[in-house]
Image (spheres, grey):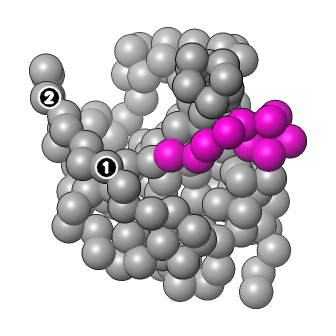
Amino acid sequence: MTQLRIRLATVDDLQVLLDLTAEDAMRAFVEPTTPTDNQRAALTELITDPAHDLLVGEIDGRIVTTAHLSWLRVLMYDGGLMCQIESVRTATGMRGQGIGNQLMTHIEAEARRRGAARLQLTSNKKRLRAHEFYQRLGFTPSHTGMKKILV
């Protein structure tokens, strides 16, 4: 298995993050493929906000995967912390090599280190292979998610 180096994203990673997003055929909104001022501002906000971690995973200096973590303090779990996992992406040509497993193992370890009570994520209903992957990692399909697109 190829070793993945996981780090926090920087503003210099924006184009690669957009490229990984563009590979996703199930997006509800078609993102611009060249960085916009709004995307730069959003990335800057995310990487400076302690309630968010935007992770990238590299192999031989090339970003091949990403995930966005939001750390949510809640009243449940005795005022516990939850880790919401969003925008998990792995480069098309790199799937099936254990990269997602390494990324998710890293995320779970960080959540445990921070004392989080729960990991949670949403996944498009059409992503059957992704659902099988998450279930192998111990996630259970316990809720029905709903979205209302506003843009």
Judge from the rendering whether residue 15 lies leftward or rightward of residue 127; answer left or right.
Answer: right
Instruction: Say which residue label 1 marks.
Output: 143
Q: What residue occupies the far right of the structure in this picture?
A: 113
Taking the spot 59% from the left edge, 71% from the top edge, the residue there is 137
User: Can see residue 115?
Assistant: yes
Q: Residue 127 sits in which quadrant?
A: bottom left
Q: Nearer the viewer, residue 33 or 90?
A: 90
Q: Which residues are magenta?
A: 111-120
User: Can see residue 16?
Assistant: no
Instruction: Say which residue label 2 marks.
Output: 149
Where's residue 74, x and y in %? 57, 20
Q: Nearer the viewer, residue 86 or 59?
A: 86
Q: Nearer the viewer, residue 63 or 111?
A: 111
Where's residue 148, x and y in %? 14, 29
Q: How many marks?
A: 2
Taking the spot 50% from the left edge, 46% from the top edge, the residue there is 120
Taking the spot 70% from the left edge, 51% from the top edge, the residue there is 107
Q: What residue occupies the far front of the structure in this picture?
A: 78
Q: Residues within 10 Å of mark 2 (few under 14, many from 20)?
A: few
